[in-house]
Image: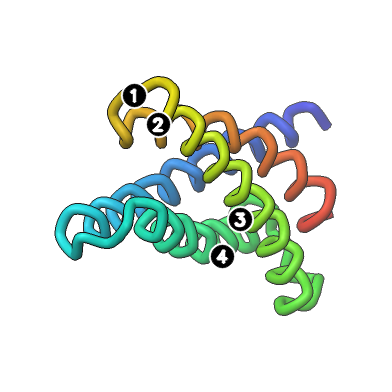
Amino acid sequence: MSSLIGTRLLQYGLVGVAGMAVDFSATWIGKEKIRLNKYLANSIGFSLAVINNFLLNRYWTFHDTAHPFAPQLIRFLLVSLSALGINHLLLYLLVNKAHKNFYLLKLVVIGLVFFYNYLLNFLFTFN
């Protein structure tokens, strides 16, 4: 059982890395190239990563096709939206208090939110 949890956590982490690539790319394009507000660009990047991560986690990490797609997607979105709120709050606090590079702080925040996401998705979305 612990081996399965470890494997799933590793897969979830790899999906997270793929999602982070989607998130960072879209955020960078939105903020730097299109000149969107950094929090709007962050929301767009986060949203695209959520779609990517849901599909990869449903079919690869948790192999959960027994549950109906739409309700599971809604649960995943609820978890992701709560994580987005935490993401924005932490990013806002760190950017305004630490005065460090936005992308470095975004990376730190993603790392912190990762464990929250895994736990809720393991227990609520894909259980």
Drawn side of residue 28 relative to residue 43, left or right: left
Disc 3 secondary structure class = helix
Q: CA distance from mark 1 to mark 2?
A: 5 Å
Task: Please tell me which residue is depicted at 44% across the width and 64% down the height of the picture.
Answer: 48
List the residue tagged with mark 2. Answer: 95
The amino acid on which the numbered mark 4 sits, given as a three-letter code, is: Leu
Disc 4 secondary structure class = helix
Drawn side of residue 93 relative to residue 3, left or right: left
Q: Nearer the viewer, mark 1 or mark 3?
A: 1
Q: Earlier in the sequence, mark 2 or mark 3?
A: 3
Q: Which mark is residue 99?
A: 1
Q: Earlier in the sequence, mark 1 or mark 4?
A: 4
The amino acid on which the numbered mark 1 sits, given as a three-letter code, is: His
List the residue tagged with mark 3. Answer: 57
Contact between marks 4 and 2 (CB within 8 A): the answer is no
Q: Which mark is residue 58?
A: none
39 vs 103: above or below: below
